[in-house]
Image (cartoon, rainbow, N blue to C red):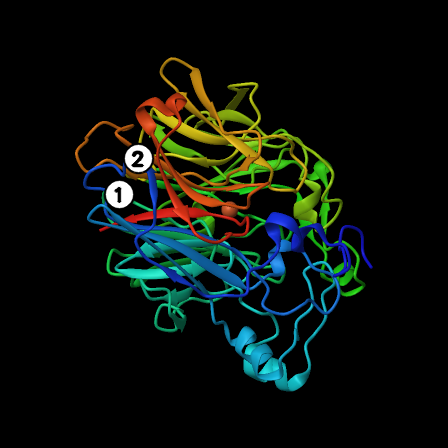
Amino acid sequence: MSAGATTTEANPFLEGLMAPVHEESDDRGLEVIGKLPDGLNGVFTRIGPNPQFSPKGAYHPFDGDGMVHAVYLEGGKARYRNRWIESKGLLAERKRGRACYGSVSEFSIPEEDVMSEGGMMKNTANTHFVRHADRFLALLEAGKPTEVSRELDTVGEFDFAGKLMGSMTAHPKIDPKTGEMIFFGYSPLPPYLQYHVADKFGVLVHSAVIEIPAPVMMHDFAITENHAVFIDSPAIFDIEAMMRHEPGIRWEPERGTRIGVVPRRGGNEDVRWFDIDPCYMVHVFNAFESGNTIELRAPSFDTMPGGLQFDSPEQTEEPFPRKWVLDLSTGSVSSEQTDDRAGEFPRINDRHTGLRNRYMYNVMARNWGFGFDFNGVVKYDNDSGKGRTFTYGDTTVVGDHAFAPDPAGQAEDDGFLMTLGVDRETEQSELMILDARKIEDGPVARVQIPRRVPLGFHANWMPE
Ligand SMILES: [Fe+2]
């Protein structure tokens, strides 16, 4: 067994609040404590790993079959629905009634008949759920997007009419002005990084290979009005080690971290790289242009978190919000930590993606092991440099907070933060809705879900 690759006996990622659920449910007329905001209609999703079958050996949360949990808000009423992503790999496993795929931490090639039905790797699509060009996409950065209906039925892998070569990040950016979806895909095998733009109709209109010296785990990136911004951190894939069931990613800080800036329709020859101190960014808040500079903000780890290296999930590194200013005229870069409150799962009002934003939201944790023990949210005002916080109850665990614009509002923070919370003791799950203008008041509405929703990855809100 490789380090951190806990087996089915005593696997913290398959127990307690992370234990998978085995039912697909539909619950209508959910009880609401407080009051749903007027006019807030749409679908809230939270996706995460939920293995249908007991793992063959090691299990890491990155391995689990994707399950989408959705809360639909419709004319003042709320309903819940959850569905597995029915990947080809999961269908192959269902046919055989057992797990057929290995773990990221104990990679193995599946049997030939399984591989011919479900592929070399299972595309669990367990990481994020987005809407673009009226298409709902469940995303896993190691695979192609999976199209899903609004009612969560799996349509199948979506490859942009055969144009998408390689995988797609779970964190595409949608330009609020042009409607384009800008994204990338990385791979442990060459080409290590590809950059893509889909137009507002969902047609892939630009692709370019960006050369980087080594295959790295690149989870997120940023856009500005005219550029895409890549983060090349020294989290290096080692496939041979993976085949030996040793940790497949190594942190090599001596290689340094670089930020790459490429024009929105540019390619490798246009990239400008900026060297920064070695650090790892899992996610970014946002980036925007101001004259000849680009400001990028992200929570930053001094080193790659153990859990992401498929290793030492107990190891705790704290991420702190940081700002980099890249000067495109001089090639210089400045950097500063902007707060001493650790936080991750950064979000903004998506209507400001790539544009100047004033507010940012970050999730706080009781501890920063890879245990998903999140308990609060901080709202930053970048004009004042101050942050305001809300901490949930002692037994509540929350996650990613999606921003839902208030249909009656115009200001950047006119909106609501939505997250799934679960009580450790009662296992009651709730959709928490906070008013982004005054998060310190706590939830204005708590939608009661009559079953436990396991802890997972990203949340999103897709308004009507
Ligand atoms: Fe993510």
| Secondary structure beneath label 1 | loop
The amino acid pointed to by label 2 is His
Query: Which residue is farthest bottom?
Result: 113
Most extreme residue toward the left is 408
Pointers 1 and 2 in contact (C-beta within 8 Å): yes
* Vertical relation: 310 (above or below) 444: below
Find residue 110 and report its image quarter. bottom right
> What number is the disc on residue 352?
2
- On the question of residue 244 being in view, the answer is yes
Q: Residue at x 33, y 64 (%)?
A: 151
**Percent x, y of residue 229:** 45, 40
Measured from the top left, where is residue 161 in percent x and y? 34, 72
Q: Is residue 329 above or below residue 236?
A: above
181, 452: nearer the viewer: 452
Residue located 65% across and 34% down the image? 368
Q: Using residue 309 as the reference point, say whether residue 333 is left or right of it.
A: left
Viewer-closest of 286 and 271: 286
